[in-house]
Amino acid sequence: MAEREPNAHQFTLDDALGVGTTSFMDLTVPEYAYMFGFLQADGHLHQGPGQKGRLAVEVNVRDIDILHAFQKLTPYNSSVRERIRSTNFAATHHSALWTLCSLEARTRINELGLPYGRKSFTITAPTSDFSVRDYIRGLIDADGSLGYTAKGFPFLSLTTASTAIATCLISHVKTVTSAERVLNRNSRDGIYNIFYAMETAQKLAQHFYYPGCLSLARKHAIADSLAAWSRPPEMRAVHTRRRWNDREDLILLRSDNCALAAQELGRTETSCNLRLWRLRTGQVPMPHGR
């Protein structure tokens, strides 16, 4: 997956107006990678009779600028309009709607991984080269959140029903920050709620929302504000969990004394007892070479 550094040449909206249709949705271009992530999370491909159909994205009117950006990045006829209607959440909802009908454009977007119809559980990260952090920023802008918790701690989160999307985020975040997460669906609605806080959230906000990137202006402003937070002196520093490896498991299994094994491994006796119990009860796999 291709990365683009913030100080590299930025593909501008003026550049987009001059490219041919063959360059449309080249996901190695940060703006298109972001756009595709946003479309996967918040866009909808509708199939009509014959070759008819449309791609539609609806956002709160306060975010209309992002739809105008998509329109400029798209070398096909499309429209942006506002509408006011009632919803389940508000008697009056003022929104903005971007609509693209071109069959050629829809085919390209569909082939990249935005299916027609229901998509929440089936979308996946692109299989070809793409600018991963820009793509993930698109997902976060559409279906994620960032800001401060009720206690004033920085956070960044993403809500998704797709295992592939959740895995993509978790894998990339681990590369950037070393923070690990275990995939578990919410028991209430079967959704993944992936959450990062404190210094990890700060680092991710800086990583995803770099200067000059295409993004929702309000979320970029929030991301910038997270840099001002610092951990209170009385708050314990973050502890990164140390993973067990096959060598350590073998030492533990061959030892008759967890206290001695703990000293050799540089771990607590409680940790060694718990790990040994998990190994013997099959809750974790036995090490290779046993």
Image: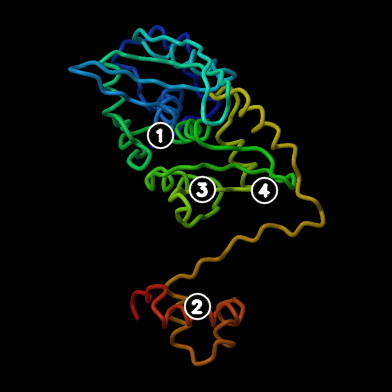
For this view, does 85 lie left or right of residue 232?
Answer: left
Label whose residue precedes the other's in the sequence (2 or 4): 4
Q: Quadrant of the C terminus?
A: bottom left
Mark 2 → mark 3, Cα distance in angstroms: 27 Å
Q: Tag 1 or tag 2, which sits nearer the N-term?
A: 1
Q: CA distance from mark 1 to mark 4?
A: 28 Å
Q: Earlier in the sequence, mark 3 or mark 1?
A: 1
Tell me the number on the disc at residue 275.
Answer: 2
- The foreground one among 194 and 236 is 194
Give the label on residue 208, or none: none
Circles 2 and 1 in contact, beta carbons < 8 Å = no
Q: Which residue is mark 3?
A: 193
Per the image, the residue denoted by label 4 is 198
Where is 208 relative to 9, above or below? below
Estimate how packed mark 3 is, as few (under 14), some (14 to 19) or many (20 or more) residues with alpha carbons within 10 Å.
Answer: some
| Residue linked to disc 1 | 2
Q: Are marks 1 and 4 in contact (CB under 8 Å)?
A: no
| Point 57% across, 36% down: residue | 207
Residue 105, position in %: x, y? 30, 17
Number of the front mark, 2 or 3: 3
As measured in the structure, the alpha-carbon distance from the residue carrying label 3 to the one carrying label 1 is: 26 Å
Please tell me whether mark 4 sits on a helix, a strand or a loop. helix
* Mark 3 or mark 4, whichever is nearer to me: 3
Viewer-closest of 64 and 111: 64
> For the residues carrying marks 3 and 1, which lies nearer the camera in this image?
3
Amino acid of disc 3: Asn
Q: Quadrant of residue 111?
A: top left
